[in-house]
Image (cartoon, rainbow, N blue to C red):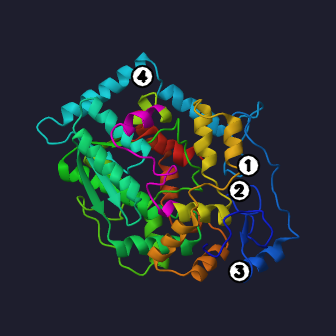
């Protein structure tokens, strides 16, 4: 146990945080007695006389998105705006003969761009289901991918073995980009201190930088990612904001290790708007969400990749062990359950019933393994008392720190045009402008 109960709502000492934009209700986190978090208890006592909810609780009539999700709205039929976004993406990436022809044209472009080169695309690989199946498809389509894995020190051994076995079976070269552990750890601790839900900011930036840096080094024009709006959904912006300037400012305020400078072939944890402009516009590197174009059904994909030696890591996102601590903190501090948008996507796609999804989220997610949470705390080099202190701080969002968000909003029309031209994935535009 990490000093805080792995469930909310049981009897014990309750620490209440102030109303925040993560949810339409008061954030409630329960801690085990006698290890009281005095500051959290004091906050709760002060706020007990205040209004707990600013809006009536409601759940989408089609999926399981509810009023705890920031930016949610409902139409007259009770359907949420995230369902509308899903439908727009279905129209943009139809699973029809025309959609298949569009994919065929993309594959042909990738092949032509790689003539005379060892690789024609870079494929992100984590050892999880989505990226593994994506790699399988690339080989099936006759492409010559270089599989790139970003290692920040929290990899799941099962996922590591998956990558080794699958790449060997498919005859794909695997290249692991290992972060500087001092930098990686320092960034993670900085975001705990920053009191925002973006605990994986360093890893997310590191993955993108590793893919772009490798593409630059190899002279490759296409990066392939294993993401699907039909099975994963899109996280609300307040729950997961990606921005290199944001990372730098949070680290500058709370970090202690100097981050290395950007190099195009070795970006490190640097991915500001200028760096993206360099890779996407000046170098012409394109990102392709391959699973958008195919009828991706998780159970069918698992049956295929299991034949390649793949094993289920134990939960979605569990190729990264830090997700165990992160999922716990998101729940007890921010009242965030990412399964709501994950399961909602599966419900919309007919891969899970709405009733099943509603039942599942009643239970604490299996990824919150106390032993793994303890392991993560030790890897960070902090104590349980320090974690409790971070949990007691008032929740914040990326809006409480200097970011590039105002510039991104200013560039809304150009970004919209770039997304329609497939220069940037449509998901990028929707993430920043249509997801709360």
Q: Quadrant of residue 285?
A: top left
Mark nearer the N terminus (2 vs 1): 2
Q: Residues within 10 Å of mark 4 (few under 14, many from 20)?
A: some
Distance from the alpha carbon under mark 2 to that under mark 3: 22 Å
Q: Is residue 387 magenta?
A: no
Q: Residue at x 38, y 67 (%)?
A: 153
Whether residue 242 appears in this view of the structure is yes
For label 3, the residue is: 37
> Relative to 251, is 413 above or below?
above
Distance from the alpha carbon under mark 1 to that under mark 3: 28 Å
Q: Which residues are magenta?
A: 300-323
For label 4, the residue is: 99
Distance from the alpha carbon under mark 2 to that under mark 4: 37 Å
| Dots 2, 1 in contact, CB < 8 A | yes
Whether residue 274 appears in this view of the structure is no
Which residue lies most toward the top here? 97
* Residue 75 as seen in the image, left or right of residue 234: right
């Amino acid at each position: 146990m990490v000093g805080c109960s792995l469930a909310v709502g049981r009897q014990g000492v309750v620490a209440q945080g102030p109303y925040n934009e993560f949810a339409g209700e008061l954030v409630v986190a329960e801690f085990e007695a006698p290890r009281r978090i005095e500051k959290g208890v004091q906050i709760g006592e002060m706020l007990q006389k205040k209004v707990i909810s600013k809006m009536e609780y409601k759940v989408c009539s089609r999926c399981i998105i509810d009023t705890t999700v920031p930016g949610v709205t409902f139409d007259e039929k009770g359907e949420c705006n995230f369902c509308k976004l899903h439908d727009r993406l279905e129209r943009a990436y139809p699973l029809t003969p025309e959609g298949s022809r569009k994919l065929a044209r993309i594959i042909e472009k990738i092949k032509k761009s790689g003539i005379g080169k060892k690789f024609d695309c870079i494929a992100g690989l984590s050892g999880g289901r989505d990226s593994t199946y994506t790699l399988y498809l690339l080989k099936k389509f006759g492409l010559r991918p270089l599989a790139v894995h970003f290692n920040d020190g929290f990899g799941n051994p099962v996922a590591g073995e998956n990558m080794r076995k699958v790449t060997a079976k498919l005859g794909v070269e695997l290249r692991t980009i290992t972060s500087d552990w001092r930098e990686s750890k320092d960034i993670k601790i900085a975001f705990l201190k920053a009191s925002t839900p973006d605990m994986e900011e360093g890893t997310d930036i590191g993955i993108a930088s590793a893919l772009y840096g490798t593409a630059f080094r190899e002279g490759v024009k296409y990066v392939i990612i294993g993401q699907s709006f039909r099975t994963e959904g899109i996280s609300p912006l307040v729950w997961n904001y990606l921005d290199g300037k944001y990372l730098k400012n949070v680290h500058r305020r709370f970090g202690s290790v100097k981050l290395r400078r950007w190099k195009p072939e070795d970006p490190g944890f640097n991915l500001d708007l200028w760096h993206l402009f360099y890779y996407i516009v000046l170098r012409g590197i394109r990102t392709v969400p391959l699973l958008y174009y195919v009828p991706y059904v998780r159970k069918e994909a698992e049956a295929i990749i299991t034949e390649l030696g793949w094993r289920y890591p134990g939960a979605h996102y569990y190729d990264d062990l830090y997700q165990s601590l992160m999922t716990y903190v998101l729940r007890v501090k921010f009242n965030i359950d990412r399964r709501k948008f994950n399961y909602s996507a599966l419900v919309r796609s007919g891969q899970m019933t709405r009733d099943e999804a509603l039942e599942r989220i009643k239970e604490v997610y299996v990824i919150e393994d106390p032993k793994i949470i303890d392991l993560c705390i030790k890897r960070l080099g902090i104590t349980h008392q320090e974690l409790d202190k971070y949990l007691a701080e008032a929740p914040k969002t990326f809006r409480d720190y200097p970011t590039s968000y105002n510039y991104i909003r200013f560039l809304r029309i150009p970004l919209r045009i770039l997304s329609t031209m497939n220069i940037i994935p449509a998901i990028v535009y929707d993430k920043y402008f249509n997801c709360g």
